[in-house]
């Protein structure tokens, strides 16, 4: 598993180094040519290329930081250093985008004539289109193979850059054939793209800092792996935290038969921890609840609770049932829909309804977070 992660990390870093070199070289040539032909659009396209380069830098920082070993001060590693570096870079990109929009609008209001496009401008934009289109397709393909969201985003940005290069080529063609200057309009389009890229990066970074839902496909894969283990009746309350690219830490609760011994439960939890680790998730704890579903009386009560709970749209699911006939307690968890304002009322109504059906039993309902 470690060798696989090391290989994956090296491939991602290597690919991003190539992306940085390509964007840097293209941007430098565009700046030189843009200045020589007096084309603001080509210069702004160079700036857009530098923002793509910054995204690759962030990806390298993220992957490298995630591989750094944890220490006493940072027991979960350094993966989230990506978010700090991202904030500084996104602020710079948004600032450049806003300034570019202001200057482009000013140029449109006080146009000083069309640029003097020559063969060098056509050549650099044609090379830019071909390189970015190829790199974009390859990055998205490799990103899917390596399960790297950052690489897929880099590929998408590169394809966007290819579209801009093609747009600039068309504007040069229109200028040379029809003597129509589209430079101010193209400049504004590129400026908006720079600003949009910065906002997208800032939103992505902010969501990670606040705490967002894990990737549904990744969570589904973990759930299927855990529930396939012998002895696991049900998997619930799977919580996943992300600490940088590919660094996932979490916990899970499972239901097992009440006749399972402590020794068997310990062996099961260790198997689950190993299985999760193979898929890139470090489980810090496995909560185990013994269910007496094998008792026909308990099974009938549980079926009734599930049937009643289904009537409430605010209740996503019920789980972790325990029916204690000695203490006369029906205990279970519910997952509520947090987008609904009436979820608490639904919970109270369900509890009241169950108390009427089972007057001799105490209804103990706890809430679980749908993560």
Image: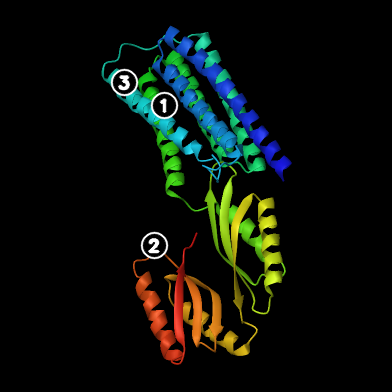
Question: Could you tell me residue 36's position as x and y percent?
Answer: 44, 7
Quadrant assignment, res 220: bottom right
State the CA–CA distance, disc 2 to disc 1: 37 Å
Residue 231 visible somewhere in the drawing: no
Residue that mark 2 sits on: 339
Residues 222 and 130: in front is 222
Judged by depth in the image, the label closer to the viewer, 2 or 1, is 2
Measuring 58% from the left and 49% from the top, which residue is drawn there?
Answer: 248
Residue that mark 3 sits on: 103
Residue 227 lies, with reference to residue 221, above or below; the image says below
Measuring 54% from the left and 30% from the top, which residue is drawn there?
Answer: 56
Question: Could you tell me residue 242's position as x and y percent?
Answer: 53, 48
Mark 1 surroundings: few (<14), some (14-19) or many (≥20) residues within 10 A: many
Measuring 35% from the left and 23% from the top, which residue is drawn there?
Answer: 100
Residue that mark 1 sits on: 190
State the CA–CA distance, disc 3 to disc 2: 43 Å
């Amino acid at each position: 598993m470690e060798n696989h992660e090391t290989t994956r990390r090296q491939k991602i870093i290597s690919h991003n180094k190539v992306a940085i070199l390509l964007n840097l070289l293209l941007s430098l040539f565009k700046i030189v040519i843009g200045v020589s032909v007096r084309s603001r659009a080509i210069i702004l396209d160079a700036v857009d290329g530098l923002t793509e380069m910054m995204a690759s830098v962030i990806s390298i920082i993220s992957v490298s930081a995630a591989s750094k070993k944890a220490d006493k001060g940072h027991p979960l590693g350094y993966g989230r250093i990506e978010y700090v570096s991202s904030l500084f870079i996104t602020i710079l990109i948004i600032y450049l985008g806003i300034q570019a929009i202001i200057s482009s609008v000013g140029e449109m209001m006080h146009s000083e004539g069309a640029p003097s496009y020559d063969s060098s401008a056509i050549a650099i934009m044609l090379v830019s289109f071909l390189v970015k289109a190829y790199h974009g397709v390859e990055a998205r393909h490799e990103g899917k193979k390596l399960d790297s969201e950052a690489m897929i985003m880099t590929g998408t940005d590169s394809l966007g850059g290819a579209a801009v290069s093609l747009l600039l080529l068309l504007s040069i063609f229109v200028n040379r054939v029809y003597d129509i200057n589209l430079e101010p309009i193209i400049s504004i389009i590129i400026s908006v793209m720079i600003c949009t890229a910065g906002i997208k990066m800032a939103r992505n970074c902010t969501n990670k800092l606040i705490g967002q839902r894990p990737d549904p496909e990744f969570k589904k894969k973990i759930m299927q792996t855990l529930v396939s283990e012998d002895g696991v009746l049900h998997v619930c309350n799977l919580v996943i935290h992300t600490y940088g690219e590919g660094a996932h830490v979490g916990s899970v609760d499972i239901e097992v038969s009440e006749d399972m011994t402590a020794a068997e439960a310990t062996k099961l939890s260790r198997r689950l921890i190993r299985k999760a680790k193979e898929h890139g998730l470090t489980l810090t704890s496995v909560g185990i609840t013994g269910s007496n579903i094998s008792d026909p009386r308990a099974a009938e009560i549980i079926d009734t609770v599930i049937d009643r709970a289904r009537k409430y749209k605010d209740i996503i699911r019920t789980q972790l049932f325990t029916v204690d006939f000695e203490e006369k307690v029906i205990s279970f968890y519910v997952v509520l829909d947090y987008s609904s304002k009436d979820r608490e009322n639904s919970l109270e109504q369900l509890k009241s309804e169950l108390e009427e059906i089972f007057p001799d039993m105490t209804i103990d309902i706890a809430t679980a977070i749908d993560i």
